[in-house]
Image: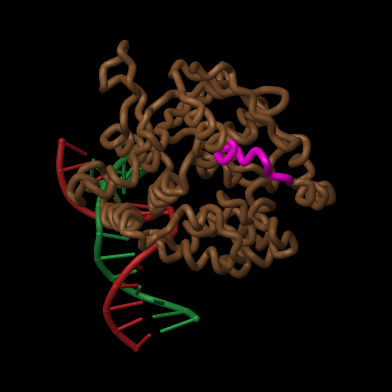
Chain colours: A brown, B green, C red
DNA sequence: GGTAGACCTGGACGC
DNA sequence: GCGTCCAGGTCTACC
């Protein structure tokens, strides 16, 4: 059957654009964000290997999804589940907003429905993307992920498009595991190539159970320990992944965090992880949310802008869209 | 537990 | 055009 516009409801408040632009993921392949039309295109490979292209846009209740593909009922159910995960539709930020309302630098969060972070369909894709953000600038991250998708992603079966033009889904674990270090190095992954291979092969061998981590209810420090065991994932990567998993107890301390907190709270004095965490400690389990959505007016650029490697203008763009 | 150096690449800069 | 330096997190070896 065809997938008629599928309407997915979210726990209010929810703003489609806020989730899309909550961080830089919307700029990474295989996603394509058509800002002018407000459409996010998500090539998606289903469990049965069927590749389809979803067109997602805002709806008063949440969002709508459309595709030209003919889908079986089980496939529609899978699409629905995956979209609910990607947009964290069931999340309830009531408690965070109650706290944020009392802090002038976070008072905007409720109105803009900020809190949800755009996720990938699988935790594997998120881990790979976080790996691609380490020790590199944002333009490099975009290049690495694009190369991976173009080289290993399964193309959409479209009779009107050649295999080179067709959108591609994010590569599967098995596809990455089947390649070799030299190929990955050739795609620019450099010293990250062995980490990526070890990750994919480790998942296939049962060494890393990402699905269990995705649904785990263990305390955040324990979950963090598991994430730190993933190859190429250190404190920064683990904190970023925890945020994507809805755990906000740890701040991903990168050079941008150091710079922002130093300038804003310590008069430009050198700071470390301890000082950064001390500033946001009072936000408890919402620590990284408070850091991420903090109004850094006066700072050179916010964490969100740093992700995008852009100047202050991206915040202006963000604010006009939301 | 803390620290130093290696890893890799693109971009900025000076010549 | 070429060479050099720097930025960016993680890992490993060493103390």
For this orientation, the residue located farthest to the top is: A160
Position of the C terminus of chain A, as image quadrant, is top right
Q: Residue at x 45, y 55 (%)?
A: A210
Q: Residue at x 44, y 18 (%)?
A: A70
Q: Is residue A88 magenta?
A: yes
For this orientation, the residue located farthest to the front is: A73
Question: Which x, y percent locates residue A138?
Answer: 43, 42
Q: Is residue A52 left or right of residue A244?
A: left
Question: Which x, y percent locates residue A62?
Answer: 68, 28
Please tell me in which quadrant of the rendered image residue A172 appears: top left
Residue A40, visible in the rendered structure: yes
Residue A191, visible in the rendered structure: no
Q: Is residue A87 magenta?
A: yes
Q: Is residue A84 above or below residue A168?
A: below
Q: How many marks?
A: 0
> Which segment is the magenta one?
A84-92
The one of A250 and C2 positioned closer to us in this rendering: A250
Classified by dominant secondary structure, the portion drawn in magenta counts as: loop
Q: Is residue A245 left or right of residue A309?
A: right
Q: Is residue A264 left or right of residue A207?
A: right
Question: Which x, y percent locates residue A132?
Answer: 38, 48
Q: Is residue A188 left or right of residue A125?
A: left
Q: Is residue A219 above or below residue A60?
A: below
Q: Is residue A15 above or below residue A246?
A: above
Q: Residue at x 28, y 37 (%)?
A: A152
Q: Is residue A197 above or below residue C15?
A: above
Please tell me in which quadrant of the rendered image residue A249 appears: bottom right
């Amino acid at each position: 059957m065809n997938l008629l516009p599928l309407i997915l409801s979210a726990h209010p408040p929810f703003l489609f654009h806020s989730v899309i632009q909550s961080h830089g993921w919307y700029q990474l392949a295989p996603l394509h964000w058509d800002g002018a039309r407000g459409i996010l295109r998500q090539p998606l490979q289903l469990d049965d290997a069927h590749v389809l292209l979803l067109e997602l846009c805002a709806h008063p209740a949440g969002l709508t999804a459309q595709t030209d593909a003919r889908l079986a009922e089980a496939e529609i159910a899978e699409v629905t589940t995956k979209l609910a995960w990607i947009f964290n539709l069931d999340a309830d930020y009531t408690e965070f907003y109650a706290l944020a309302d009392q802090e002038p630098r976070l008072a905007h969060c409720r109105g803009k429905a900020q809190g949800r972070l755009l996720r990938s369909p699988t935790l594997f894709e998120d881990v790979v993307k976080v790996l691609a953000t380490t020790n590199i600038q944002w333009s490099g991250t975009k290049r690495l992920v694009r190369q991976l998708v173009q080289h290993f992603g399964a193309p959409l079966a479209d009779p009107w498009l050649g295999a080179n033009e067709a959108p591609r889904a994010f590569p599967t674990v098995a596809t990455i595991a089947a390649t070799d270090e030299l190929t990955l190095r050739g795609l620019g992954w450099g010293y990250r190539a062995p980490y990526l291979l070890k990750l994919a092969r480790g998942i296939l061998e049962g060494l890393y159970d990402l699905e269990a981590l995705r649904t785990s209810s263990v305390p955040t420090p324990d979950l963090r320990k598991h994430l730190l065991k993933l190859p190429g994932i250190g404190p920064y990567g683990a904190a970023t992944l925890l945020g994507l998993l809805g755990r906000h107890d740890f701040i991903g301390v990168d050079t941008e965090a150091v710079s922002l907190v130093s300038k804003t709270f310590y008069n430009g004095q050198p700071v470390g992880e301890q000082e950064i965490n001390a500033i946001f400690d009072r936000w408890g389990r919402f620590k990284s949310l408070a850091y991420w959505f903090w109004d850094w007016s006066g700072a050179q650029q916010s964490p969100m802008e740093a992700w995008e490697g852009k100047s202050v203008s991206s915040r202006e763009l963000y604010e006009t869209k939301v």
